[in-house]
Image (spheres, rainbow, N blue to C red):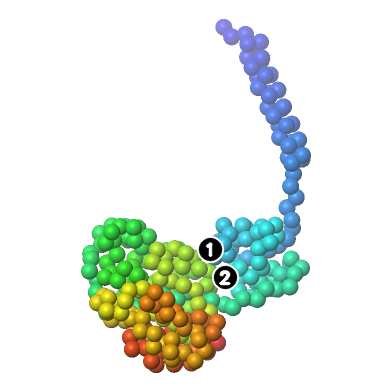
Amino acid sequence: MISFAGIAYPILVLGSLGLAFGALLAFASIKFFVAVDERVSKIREILPGANCGGCGYPGCDGYADGVVNAGAKTNLCAAGGSDLAKGIASIMGVEGESSEPVRAFLKCKGSPDFSVRNADYVGVRDCRSAAIVPGGSPNSCPFGCIGFGTCVKVCVFGALSIVNGLAMIDPTKCVGCGTCVANCPKSVLKLVPRSSDVQVTCNSNWRGPDVKRVCTAGCIGCGICVKACQVGAITLNANLASIDASKCTNCGACAAKCPAKCIGSVMPEELKASA
C-alpha cells in the first residue's frame, strides 16, 4: 500500500523544481532581454512578403533585420521596386538609393527547331538533377537551356513557363529578383535592365563550326558585332559575344550585321512603350 507521504514527496520535489526553473527563466528573460528596433517591424510591414530571397537575405524578415542591423542597402527588394526603396529609406532616415529595374533574360534560342535533341532523359524532371548526370541533358548543346522547368518551380511570381523546350519569361510578372538565375545549373538565365532592347541569345563558348554542328541559332564568335558597335558595348570572350547594357544604345547595328542572327531585339512591346 502506498502511503500519502510516498506520493506527496515526489509531487513536492517536482513542484519545487518547476517553481525554481520558472523563476530562473523569468530572470533570464529580463536579464538577457534584447530590445527589437521598431524600424525592423515597420520595414517588415511594407515589404511584399514574397520571401523570394532575391535580396540575398533569408526572406523578408531577414532583409528587414539586415537593413536595420547589418547596413543592408534600402533598394535590394526587386519585388517592391523604387517606391518600396524610398519607403525603407524614409523609415531609416537616409537618402534613398536608386537602382535600375531589371528582368530575367534567357541566353538561349536552342529550341528543337534550332538545336537537335540527342538524348531521351529518364529521371527526375529537374534541371539541377539532370545537369549532374552525364548525358542528363537532352540537348546536343551542353550550354543551352535544359528545359525541365527548375526556374518555373522556384519563381514565386509565376513569371516563367516552359514553351517548346525553353524557359519563357513573362516580363509583366518578372520583378527581377534573380531567384531563377541563382537556380539555373547552366547559367543560361541572367538579369538585364528592363530598358535593354538588344542581347545575345546564346550561352555557348564553343568555336563557330562546333556551335553550328549542334545549333543553327548560336553565336559563332566571328566578332563582326564587335566591329559594328560604335560605342564599344560589345566584347568577345571565349568565342561568345557579350553586350554591356550600360553602354549599349539599342541602335541595333550589331543585330543587323550578325550573320548567325543570334543578336536581336528582346524587349517586348509592352516594355518598349514604357521605356
The residue that appears at 45% across and 76% down in the rendered structure is: 105
Q: Which amino acid does label 1 sit on?
A: Cys
Question: Which mark, residue 79?
Answer: 2
Quadrant holding the N terminus: top right
Give the image location of residue 62, x and y in percent. Answer: 61, 57
Camera-side residue: 104 or 160? 104
Image vertical order of residue 115 relative to residue 229, above or below = above
Q: Considering the image in quadrants, where does the C terminus appear?
A: bottom right
First in sequence: mark 1 vs mark 2: 1
Nearer-the-camera pick, 30 or 251: 251
- Indicate left or right for 115 with 95 as reference: left
The span from disc 1 to disc 2 (Cα, nearest Å) is 9 Å
Identify residue type, mark 2: Ala
Residue 270 showing in the rendered view: no
49 relative to 183 in the view: left or right: right
**Marks 1 and 2 in Cβ contact (< 8 Å):** yes
